[in-house]
Image: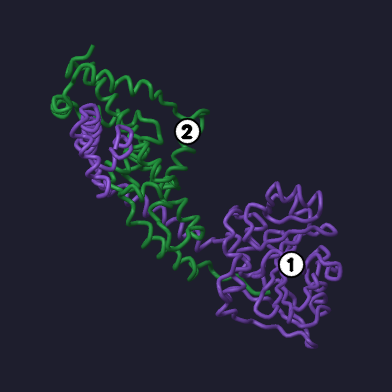
Amino acid sequence: MDCNGVQQYAGSAIDGFLARDVKTEFQTHLERCKPCRQEIALEKLSKQLVQRHVSWIPTPRSIQTLVLTSLHQEYKAAGSGDDSWMARVTRFSILVPALAGGAVAAVFFLLVGIPSDRSSRLSAHTAENDIIHQSFETFALLKTGQLAPALVSSAPESVSAFFQRSSLQFGVQIPYIRGSDWCGGSASDINGVKQAHLLYKLGDEWVYVCETSGDDAMSGTQLSLPPAAKIALARSGWYTDPMHPNCNVVVWKKDEVVCVAVSTMGKKQLLVLLTSPTNLPKQL
Amino acid sequence: MASLKQPSVSRGTKKKHAEFEAEALPHMDVLYNFALRTAGNENDARDLLQETYLKAYRFWDKYEKGTNIRAWLFRIMKNSYINRYRKETKEPDKVDYDDIENFYNSIRAQSTDPNDLQQQLYGNLLGDEVTKALQSLPDDFRTVVILCDIEGLTYEEIAEFIESPIGTVRSRLHRGRKLLQETLYEYAKQQGIIKGD
């Protein structure tokens, strides 16, 4: 081992992490090299001075109390007013009009036993008012049974009729998802922002679509989209998040309605369903 | 139309709160010490610690369960520190390594015995001077010195904290200690504790 090698392992030797296989070589060099000995002695002295003079101290009680109090306030705020978007959205079914008979069944269901999916890796869109973030969270609520569609039906016409009778003021798109067993729907109105929510079941897979009027999504004050998404939607009408290839989120804009789809399916499969010529979204 | 219920804390919120407290609070001392040595005074350390815990609480759903929570909290604190105190700094700290090498060469040239130096510095420098010297280190070096020499973390854990390879930890530690030594040597010379040229 030469002087450079000793430099490389100096810290490990001082901190007691020197691997056994280099220890002998390291010590042999030190015995015959005074400059290296001196340098290591100085580095060791530096550590000793810090340890002697800069003591590790426990967090003062007053600061512990301050942190705990802040957290408790945050907890109460999240629980009570929580009129965070999350709490309000869990109540959105109250706005859905009652539906009569026919093939439509209003169902409250628990989606238990669904394995964790790729979409849970979404981590970028953290703003509370980011539509992609909200869609992802709503999808998670649907999967865990904390949120249920107001109705489900195997007949797309029934879902269309449901939205026509709701108070939504934009033309809801009912994407035709080939192979779906059924489709569920709900409508929400949160602080004047109206949204349609659709849930599809295809065997073991799920697709959730959130729809918002283009005005609210693109230039409203209460919702937001990443700038890259706005640019992509303006250019091509489609957007997938390139920063998060494993997040199965697809956004598209059609007839002044912005739709966000989140799915347990891979993004490619989802895109095929949403974009194939025979399966393009149909407007009501 | 259904009526709105009196707001109450949901089961999910309660669970989140309990989980957060159980996982994150045990690391308060480590974070406080880092904040204290980084910010330099108790008031700023208190604010930094509070901000770190509040941010961590708000983004708790982004924490990947089973990963190193101490490293996650540390990174939140580091970012908060940078945002809070370094916003106006346009350029990262620069260190002139030639100066450090010159220091070591001068020590060698003077044939200063490290044992003598140790006795002189160890016995005469005050805690405030060491603290001040530590705070004068560039962020990257100070961070690893604090984590290793005060917090007692392993190189592996420091590497995880700063999201860099172990080689970078070794290198920063080595250079950070050298730089610290040089600063202390200068203090000691100014105060006549040791003689210099």
Q: Quadrant of residue A95?
A: bottom right
Q: Which residue is mark 1?
A: A196
Does residue A60 appear anywhere in the picture? Answer: no
Three-letter amino acid code of the residue under disc 2: Arg
Residue B54: image location, x then y, percent:
45, 51
Q: Which residue is mark 2?
A: B86
Is residue A127 toward the left or the right of residue A161 in the image? left
- Chain at numbered mark 2: B
Q: Which residue is located at x 43 percent, y 52 percent? A: B72
Residue A191 vs A146, above or below: the answer is above
Q: Quadrant of residue B17?
A: bottom left
Residue A10: image location, x then y, percent:
28, 38
Q: Quadrant of residue A52?
A: top left
SS for dot 1: strand
Is residue B88 toward the left or the right of residue A148 in the image? left
Does residue B94 appear anywhere in the picture? Answer: yes
Count of picture labels: 2
Q: Which residue is located at x 51 percent, y 63 percent? A: A80
Residue A139 vs A105, above or below: the answer is above
- Chain at numbered mark 1: A
Give the chain ID for the purple colour.
A
SS for dot 2: loop
Give the quarter of the figure containing the N terminus of chain B.
bottom right
Residue B71: image location, x then y, percent:
40, 51
**The color chain B is rendered in:** green
Q: Nearer the viewer, mark 2 or mark 1?
A: 2
Using the rendered image, report if marks 2 and 1 lie on a common chain: no
For the residue pair B92 and A163, the one nearer the viewer reads as B92
Three-letter amino acid code of the residue under disc 1: Ala
Crowding around mark 1 (Cα neighbors within 10 Å: few <14, some 14 to 19, many 20+) is many
For the residue pair A185 and A68, the one nearer the viewer reads as A185
Residue B143 vs A59, above or below: the answer is above
